[in-house]
Image (cartoon, coloured by chain):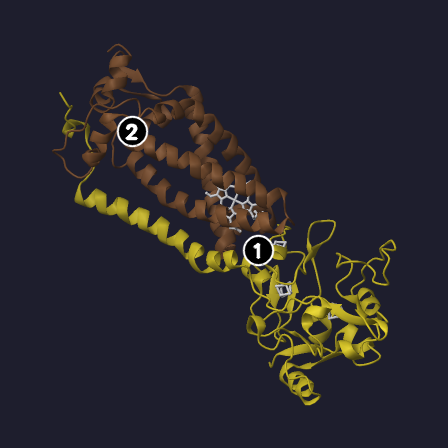
Amino acid sequence: MSNMIRKAGPFEIVNHWALAISFFALVLSGFGFLFHLEQMNALFGSFSRMRFIHNWAGVIFMVSLFLTMFTYLPVSLRLGSDDIGWILKAGGYLSKKAVVPPQDIINTGQKLYYLVFLLTGSAISASGLGIWFIAGVKKWVLISHLVHNISFDLLVTIIPLHIYLGTLANPGTFRIMVYGTVPLEWARKRHEKWVRRMGY
Amino acid sequence: MTRKALLISPEICIGCRGCQTACKEWNQLDGVKTSNAGSFENPPDLIPALYNRIRYVEVPTEAEGQRWLFVSQRCMHCGDAGCMKICPAPGALYKTPEGAVAFSKEKCIGCKLCVTACPFDVPRYDKDGKISKCHLCSDRISQGLPPACAKVCPTGAIRYGERDDLIASAKKTGHEKVYGEMDLTGLGALYAFKDAPRLYGMNENPAIPESVIFWNNILKPLSYLGLGGAVALALIHYVAFGPKKNEEVTRDE
Ligand code: HEM
Ligand code: SF4
Ligand code: SF4
Ligand code: SF4
């Protein structure tokens, strides 16, 4: 269709699903460990198996997180006056009348979200490896345990907001994760700088 | 059921290691080849196949050349047990009605977190990575039998009984301070020391690591709060402001 524009390629879509699915498995098993939720056995079989799945889902999460850097990191670091303008208008989320400055392929909120997610995701990955592989080195396992759980609290707070903003709050966004394309008009309103750079 | 305990009296321990052997026999723990490290102490530390070890402490004195101190090192069956707090697998560590901290290798997932939260560096892990430690002979005491180590001790240096009675009897024999009476809401292994516990290599102020307490009291509940708060915030936003429909978005001209 000529009035569609490709916002995400196959690599980006597959990687996003790998990240999302591994994350879901990690959060469910994580809550299972934290609160001894034996109901999780219906999903994972046993706590031993849940540990196995948690650890290996962690590896998928980690690799997938690393790969996101090629897609989102450069643009997320490109912050300028339009981003300040976006923040001052709260991204247009607190008033229907607000008009926000033109945005790149991802908006200011998405850039900041990505940077926080990358840092927290790296922290939970590194500390997860710590608990897994340096068992017995007391001091470092305790630090890892602390970092793993602080990052967990942060992630379970920011991810639901990310999901809300990518689905209910912005109709038309979720299809990016499925098809990778969006209507040109939709993109022009929300990612004008990028659309212009693409020559439209 | 009232809480049971062991009372260990190092002064009358003769270092025969009968308890070490009886424990291994009852728990069917394999013999392990060790090497001479220049001391009668053997093995040099707790290992998966040794739940109870007599520590030999040589204290130089002016008069006699040196003094020998013997003390049993094992799980202390803490009232407030760090190992149980941190363990992510339900049922892997559990309290028996007598107050013993027992374990189930079936339920243990081998994460080895418990040793990091134990103030006494007790848990060890077998070749499958599963927890191995003194369980106060939970299988014996549930049948009304004394733990193997207490039964076999020839001098009464390890006694098993009602915790309150043991504390009272230690106080009667002149031990004003019983080690483990109050620590961590009371230990299930009590020690009647005449000398400073430090001299025996004991931790004088045993405590669960602060990070573990912080995690348990703050970080754990915060995870539910964060998740719930985020979902609530999304809901409130949806109701109060509604979605950003494309027709309603205006470009900055
Ligand atoms: C990225 C690599 C990761 C690795 C290698 C890893 C590894 C571990 C390990 C070894 C444990 C201890 C229990 C066990 O052995 O299963 C653990 C616990 C836990 N993990 Fe992960 N994990 C990772 C990522 C994550 C992620 C992304 C989350 C959630 C978003 C998460 C949440 C938790 C929670 C809540 C616990 C239980 C709390 C605790 O006992 O510390 N982990 N993880
Ligand atoms: S090693 Fe076993 S007993 Fe120890 S904390 Fe992990 S699951 Fe619990
Ligand atoms: S001494 Fe260590 S292993 Fe034993 S109950 Fe206390 S914390 Fe747990
Ligand atoms: S109580 Fe039982 S398991 Fe514990 S040291 Fe004594 S004999 Fe061994």
Chain that is yellow in the image: B
* Residue at x 58% of width, y 48% of height: A141
Q: Using a 10 Å C-alpha cutoff, classify the residue at mark 1 as few (fewer than 14 neighbours), some (14 to 19) or many (20 or more).
A: many
Q: Please say if the residues under marks 1 and 2 sit with CB atoms less than 8 Å apart.
A: no
Callout 2: helix, strand or loop?
A: loop
Label 1: chain letter: B
- Left of A150 or right of it: where is A83? left
Residue B121 drawn above or below residue B147: above
Q: Which amino acid lies under the numbered mark 2 shown in the image of this protein?
A: Thr
Q: Is mark 1 within 8 Å of ligand 2?
A: yes
Percent across and percent down for residue B136 are 70, 70
Q: According to the rendering, which colour does chain A have?
A: brown
* Residue at x 56% of width, y 62% of height: B208
Q: Is residue B3 visible?
A: yes
Front-most of A80 and A147?
A80
Instruction: Identify the residue under disc 1.
Output: B89
Residue B118 drawn above or below residue B72: above
- Left of B183 or right of it: where is B189? right
Front-most of A21 and B51?
B51
Which residue lies most toward the top here?
A: A199
Callout 1: helix, strand or loop?
A: loop
